[in-house]
Amino acid sequence: MRIAVPVLSVALCAAFAACAGGGDDGASAPAATARVVTSTVEPTPTPAPSPTATPIVVAELPIVDLHFHPEAAWGDGLIALFDRVNVRAAGNGAQAPDPEALALAERYAPRVVPFGGGYPLRQFVLRLGAAAWDVESAEVRAYLDALEDELAAGRFRGIGEIHVDSTASYFTGTPPIRYPADAPLMQRLWAMSAVYGLPVSVHMDGSTESVASMERLLASDRRGTWLWAHTGHYAEPPLVRRLLRDHPNLFCELSYRSSISPSRTAVPLDNNGVLREEWRALLEEFPDRFVIGTDLPVASAAEYTRHIGFWRAILEQLTPETAALLAHLNAERLLKRGQ
Ligand SMILES: [Zn+2]
């Protein structure tokens, strides 16, 4: 049974850079092997974004927020809030076990898009350490099988948020996490991403070692989709540009990269709301590889409104075509892959 999806049929999914030809599957370890091997994702060519027939009014663009952790504290006002700020859909993992994430998505259907695995796997990693990320724990293996069953049933639209390196960016009250982005746990999730066509949202600081391990995983199977939460917090345009050129299956999400985010380590892409030139150039160079996120630490309608307002002001500084891609088209294309 598939959960109803947001309005995804409008002028989207023109293409997705599914490099289906890509190399070996990188899944030689047992832990990395998804049990279902038939991909539902058809490779398609990747035409450049084409102008739409009607002029794009940036201020009126719907937004799809791909770093929204649903929680009950939003209450019944969430949909009215989304309507007020013209957020078409929002999604990522709940700060709760998977059944609760699904219940929240159902409560707010079709506007909240559920991701699975983030919270449970984080608890395993914090409790078991290497036995979790090396998938040596029977408990973890059983959980991964259960998660895959949910993905196979189409109940989740993504995987995450998975924390593989929060050494510099952990938030107060939780210990930092660090393990290789191509550890067996990530290999298993990557295989699921490839097979079921779902993005994996990954919180990973842009350290040299973490980036290298991410690149190995990205190259191991080009059908997988990496949604880099916060674009690594402090990764800057020269590194991001090089990675986007080398890895067609890398997508960057921009929460916590704004000057209004309370981050200790992120380097904002703007100065007081004015997009830095190097970021503007990067977004225009790769307009189909970035998505917007909010990632608020608390359920606050005022803060949510402020963050969406911030991103709208950023969108106004881009070409209308790029603005439309960042606002919603890229996110919708990613969410539509697994269907
Ligand atoms: Zn995060």
Image: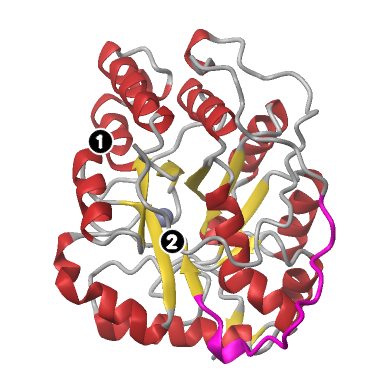
Tell me which corner region of the image, top left, top right, bottom left or bottom right, holds residue 109.
Answer: bottom left
Secondary structure under tag 2 reads loop
Please, is residue 131 above or below residue 19 in the view?
above
Does 55 lie within the magenta span?
Answer: yes
- Image quadrant where residue 307 sits: bottom left
Residue shown at 73% from the left, 57% from the top: 14
**Looking at the picture, how far across and down is residue 328, in whole percent?**
56, 69
Does residue 1 lie above or below 136 as drawn?
A: below
**Image coordinates for residue 210, horizontal then vertical, percent:** 58, 40
Is residue 76 within the magenta segment? Answer: no
Of 293 and 87, nearer the camera is 87
Residue beneath disc 2:
6
Asked if the residue at label 2 sits under 8 Å from ligand 1, the reply is no
| Residue nearest the viewer, comparing 305 with 257 | 305
Q: CA distance from mark 1 to mark 2?
A: 30 Å
Residue marked by disc 1: 123
